[in-house]
């Protein structure tokens, strides 16, 4: 991956970690789902309010490394306003792309349609960090089901 692109991706992750979007808790009738990675200590709960099958509000709360926090922030921005069906499709595609060592990661091609979420493709070089990047996405899937 080109050095400039790596720097851009790192800056996106650092920015979302420093100033996470949609951080906080929602109260009932919001649904929630918790993701916990005991191997590194990441612990994230995703909260959603769904109206007419559309995600009207989505937030997250919890602690973890920069990658898990940035990924949760990016996830909330991307899934807001999506239908459950759309959100599930996006979650499945992102998680499988990040988890599949054979998926093309050159320049984030497989995630290019998802804007800044493509910055997460860098974790593919660090297999132990893939769980950090996908934790909030799995929690979101549980919350929107």
Image (spheres, rainbow, N blue to C red):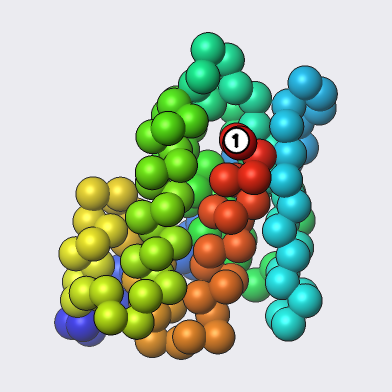
**Of the pair 62 and 19, the residue shown nearer to us:** 62
Q: Residue at x 28, y 81 (%)?
A: 102
Few, some or many residues within 10 Å of mark 1 (<14, 14–19, 20+): many
For mark 1, give the secondary structure.
helix
Estimate the x, y position of residue 51 in percent, counting from the top left.
Answer: 57, 15
The relative height of residue 40 versus residue 145 in the rendered view (above or below) is: below
Instruction: Using the rendered view, name the quadrant where residue 47 is placed.
Output: top right
The correct choice, above or below, for 6 with respect to 90 in the image is below
Please identify the quadrant where the C terminus is shown.
top right
Residue 63 visible, this angle: no
* Residue at left offset 51%, top offset 19%: 53
Q: Residue at x 72, y 72 (%)?
A: 37
| 3 sits left or right of 41 in the view | left
Q: Which residue is mark 1?
A: 144
Q: How many marks?
A: 1
Instruction: Name the image quarter holding residue 83.
Output: top left
Q: Position of residue 49 (x, y in %)?
A: 64, 25
- Where the N terminus falls, by quadrant? bottom left
Residue positioned most to the right: 28
Against 133, residue 101 (above or below) is below
Lateral position of residue 42 relative to residue 108, left or right? right
Decide if residue 25 is in sight here.
yes
**In this view of the protein, which residue sits in the foreground, 89 or 55?**
89
């Amino acid at each position: 991956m080109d050095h400039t692109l790596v720097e851009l991706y790192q800056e996106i992750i650092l920015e979302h970690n420093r100033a996470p979007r949609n951080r906080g808790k929602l109260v009932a009738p919001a649904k929630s789902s918790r993701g916990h990675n005991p191997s590194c200590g990441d612990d994230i709960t995703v909260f959603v309010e769904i109206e007419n099958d559309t995600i009207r509000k989505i937030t997250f709360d919890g602690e973890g490394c920069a990658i898990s926090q940035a990924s949760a922030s990016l996830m909330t921005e991307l899934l807001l306003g999506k239908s459950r069906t759309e959100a599930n499709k996006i979650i499945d595609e992102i998680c499988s792309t990040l988890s599949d060592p054979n998926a093309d990661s050159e320049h984030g091609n497989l995630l290019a349609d998802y804007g800044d979420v493509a910055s997460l493709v860098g974790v593919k070089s660090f297999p132990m960090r893939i769980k950090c990047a996908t934790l909030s996405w799995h929690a979101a899937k549980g919350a929107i089901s």
